[in-house]
Image: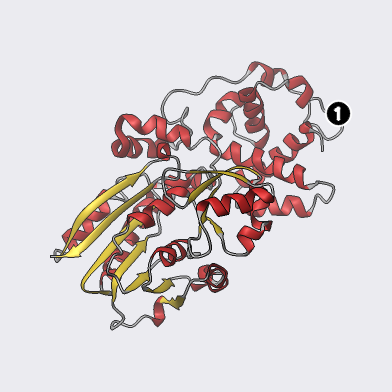
Amino acid sequence: MTPAARVAAAADILDGILGGAPAEKALTGWARGSRYAGSKDRAAVRDHVFQALRCLRSYAALGGGEETTGRSLMLGAMRAEGADLDVIFSGEGHAPAPLSEEELAGGRAPEAGAEACDMPEWLWPALEAALGDAAADEASLMRERADVFLRVNPLYGTVAEAQAALAEEGVVSEVHPLSPMALKVLEGARRVRLSHAFEDGLVELQDAASQAVVDWLPLDGAQTVLDYCAGGGGKSLAIAARSDAKIVASDIAPERMKDLPERATRAGASIVVKSLEDLSTDDCFDFVLCDAPCSGSGAWRRSPAGKWQLSEDSLAALCDTQVEVLKAASGHVAEGGQLAYVTCSLLGVENEDVVARFQALAPEWHCTVQKRWLPSDGGDGFFGAIFARK
């Protein structure tokens, strides 16, 4: 595929996403119907699509037009890149059709604030309330592609040994300051899953800030740990790498944990997987982690469609769910144990406000410490709070 044909394909896929199709489903459908596209073509088209979703509002402004379409977004993208528009929009072969006079004359610079930072207008006040003067800088980082990070499994080797093993297979990395076990991939990211280091459990894919959250958890002395909202189990695996505690992973949707037993075996970790229904009221733990369902605003570089799918009503519902999750999980904390609340959100309504709401509803609990990790720290955005009984 030519560069222009890739732009045309991305525009078509974006039209489907703008029409309501999930991004991954739209990309998969295109790939299955485009057998002529090689791996490099598929990767390039995917990059176009996800970058357009990260920068949807600013690209729409640059693209002009009364309606946002896949074509207008890709026109805005090409203008942002300084590409030769006559070459891309030539109409030759599989290239997009030539630009109209209106398209040539249209387009404008995005306005400062929510549009320039590619955030929903309704959400911008909440982000400013949470981050203050840093809101624009942190939001702008969400317009960039996320780095690929690995967590070195200390059960199988050192950071230096992992770097050397990866380098032998073309994966170049550097240590990252957010966590002592974190590696940032500099070259060969698409080779990671095929590497022996990954297949043998020496490294796992995990964001550096997610690793830092687990490093921060006060697990010393805990003999039993419950990962209450385990999802794929990344934090369960990270806990197992630094603690000898008995670990139970649970989730309201057990299918999310379907790969965890295999991942745990590969990592040399012992993790018991249970559905929430299998947890009895008598199942109590020294430490309970609630990595609660959230907007994912701290990880919108990785899942940019989430920015545009979130609404005021769905955010309010998420905040209510977060309080309910904390209340339910607190019933599984043993006497003298601790409860952790974690989100990958930048929003105060999901973080500090939920902490305050939980303490008001459960006055026997008090927050002992809170911490934020911002995109400017190098990884995704996270929030954590630790609770203990009074």
Tell me if I can see residue 240 in this picture.
Answer: yes
Residue at 38%, 41% in the rendered image: 374
Residue at 28%, 83% in the rendered image: 282
Secondary structure of the residue carrying tag 1 is loop
Residue at 33%, 83% in the rendered image: 280
348 sits to left or right of 17: left
Q: Residue furthest right?
A: 93
Instruction: Give the residue at mark 1.
Output: 92
The spot of residue 100 in percent (x, y) is 73, 21
Front-lying residue, 131 or 338? 338
Q: Quadrant of residue 346?
A: top left
Which quadrant would the C terminus be assigned to in this image?
bottom left
387 sits to left or right of 90: left
Q: Quadrant of residue 43?
A: top right
Q: Is residue 91 above or below residue 388?
A: above
The spot of residue 143 in percent (x, y) is 51, 35
The spot of residue 148 in percent (x, y) is 56, 46
Tell me if I can see residue 64 in this picture.
Answer: no
Residue type of the residue flagged with mark 1: Glu
